[in-house]
Amino acid sequence: MKRILILGGTTEARQLAGKLAARADLAITLSLAGRTENPVTQGVPTRVGGFGGAEGLAAYFGEAGMHLLIDATHPYAGRISANAAQAARNTGVPIIALRRPGWESVRGDRWIPVDNVAGAVEALGASPRRVFLALGRQEVAAFEAAPQHHYLIRSVEPVEPRLAVHDATYLLARGPFREADERTLLESHSIDTVVSKNSGGEATYGKIAAARALGIEVIVIRRPTLPDVPSAETVEALAAMVDHFLEPDAERGV
């Protein structure tokens, strides 16, 4: 029985875990960071909470007897991915990663690329705007530095404490989000600017397509640099890599 740890929190991680758990020769553990209080049911044995950085993760490998680590975290979980790669190097446990492709701008998009959330705050400028923040609750506090804008804030769980700004509307919702619904949302709140990560995938692309159709600017936060480890872009392609990386080093040609 080969033991695999999947670092998750994404739809693809859940799908991959289910796919691999169907195999009788694999024992799957799915790890969640614990930022969401009521996560979607994962369907496999799940560990919730951090490991204590790269050292703690490496120690867990030894305690649990892991044979393979799969990083299927969100494209913006840069610190977790870095810790995973370091732990794998320190222990010799093979690592593979799911690297979801980012969105590409197309004709009609009005994208303003920035490097981070602070850059997004600055890009809004001094004049009041009506801004849709589609970032998740961990990042929105930075926009307190620009209280002149009206904010529509969407998150899976409540933003607590609420922002110290003059005008904000809070919306609780979990994707996927259809383009038609996103267009209705933007129009009903008179949004003139969207702030978004370049998350990739179909589940949250609706707001990008809706903004294009309405001629609305989108401030796009670039992805962090992630570790260079063997990777695939889809669940199917990554699942096909598993057996190769479970082989002894000599057989893999390492």
Image (spheres, helix red, strand yellow):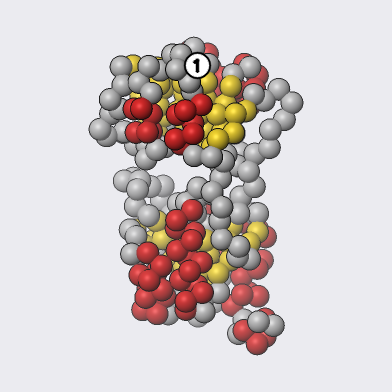
Residue 99, given in percent of the width and then of the height, sits at: 60, 54
How many numbered callouts? 1
Residue at mark 1: 191
Q: Is residue 49 left or right of residue 19?
A: left
Say what amino acid the circle numbered 1 marks: Ile
Residue in the image at 40% along x and 21% along y: 151
Is residue 22 rendered to the left or right of residue 50?
right
Q: Quadrant of the C terminus?
A: bottom right
User: Which residue is depicted at the point 31% across and 33% down?
Assistant: 159
Question: Relative to 65, is 238 above or below?
Answer: above
Question: How far across and how far down the image is residue 216, in percent?
Answer: 59, 19
Q: Looking at the rendering, which quadrant does residue 198 occupy?
A: top right
Seen at 41% across and 22% down, the residue is 152
Front residue of 158/113: it is 113
Residue at x 49% of width, y 53% of height: 78
Question: Whole-percent x and y of residue 59?
Answer: 37, 75
Q: Please determine whether, in this image, residue 4 is positioned above or below residue 131.
A: below
Residue 157, image x, y percentages: 34, 36
Is residue 171 visible in the rendered image? The answer is no
Secondary-structure class at tag 1: loop
- Location of residue 97 by image quarter: bottom right
